[in-house]
Image: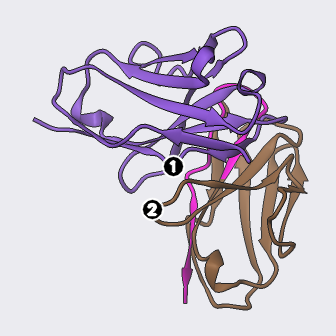
Chain colours: A brown, B purple
Amino acid sequence: DIQMTQSPSSLSASAGDRVLITCRASQSISTYLNWYQQTPGAAPKLLIYGASTLQNGVPSRFSGSGSGTDFTLIISSLQPEDFATYYCQQSYRSPYTFGQGTMLEIK
Amino acid sequence: EVHLVQSGAEVKKPGESLRISCKGSGYNFISYWISWVRQMPGKGLEWMGRVDPSDSSTNHSPSFQGHVTISVDESINTAYLQWSSLKASDTAMYYCARHYSSPEFDSWGQGTLLIVSS
């Protein structure tokens, strides 16, 4: 299985901050990397697919980059509704493994 | 608009069987795979497997192979996740999700909470 490792596991930040979350794959996955946001009590929501393509309706303050094994999710200016848990997922090969999650908390 | 609606919460005893469902609407159901994802209490997301509604073929994660069965009834636009003998460790929230192109999971059900307790 392809292992996905996110860092950090948790992060405290303030509204307006720029935040970076990284995701590393245990082998090359090209750009088959997706990012999801999950707020408490809700289902995950797709933010970015193909490493850098913004899903319809997702604010432009979210962006993604990377290829191969190293990927980054950037939130350019945190809004109150962005405090959530973020997961990366590889869709290169089954089983489609997720990272362990990054919990973004209010400082 | 794409909707995936899952069956309601369940409370079961160890050893019991169960089937939960995920009904799709607002799109051509047979054109997109459906996956199931587990989230244990306070934990992350785990991909369990997927079904292709066009031919009922399945692919289970090795971590779940043999313990759950994924199936589909395309005539009623519904995918299923089934256990024949539940364990307390099956207590979790279960989500269905639609595969899109990459495949990324672009639409999710609301989740089905399963509690297994004696």
Q: Quadrant of residue B33?
A: top right
Q: Disc 2 is attached to a residue of which chain?
A: A
Q: Disc 1 is attached to a residue of which chain?
A: B
Q: Look at discs 2 and 1 and give the one toward the viewer.
A: 1
Q: Is residue B50 above or below residue B96?
A: above
Tell me the quadrant of the picture where the C terminus of chain B can be found: top left
Which residue is tagged 2?
A41
Which mark, residue A8?
none
Amino acid marked by disc 2: Gly
Locate residue B63, reporting x and y percent: 48, 24
Q: At x 61% / y 45%, what residue is drawn?
A: B108
Q: Label 2 neighbourhood size at 10 Å, few (<14), some (14-19), many (20+)? A: few
Q: In this view, does B117 lie to the left or right of A15?
A: left
Q: Is residue A74 above or below residue A55?
A: below
Q: What stretch is highlighted in magenta?
A: A88-107
Locate residue A11, reporting x and y percent: 58, 76
Amino acid marked by disc 1: Gln
Which residue is tagged 1?
B110
Q: Quadrant of residue A74?
A: bottom right
Cα separation, mark 2 vs mark 1, equals 9 Å
- Nearer-the-camera pick, B64 or B29: B29
Say if the magenta span includes residue A104.
yes
Q: What element carries label 2?
A: loop
Say if the magenta span includes residue B26.
no
Q: In this view, does B46 lie to the left or right of A66?
A: left
Q: Label 1 neighbourhood size at 10 Å, few (<14), some (14-19), many (20+)? A: many
- Nearer-the-camera pick, A81 or B21: B21
Q: Is residue A42 above or below residue B33?
A: below
Q: What element carries label 1?
A: loop
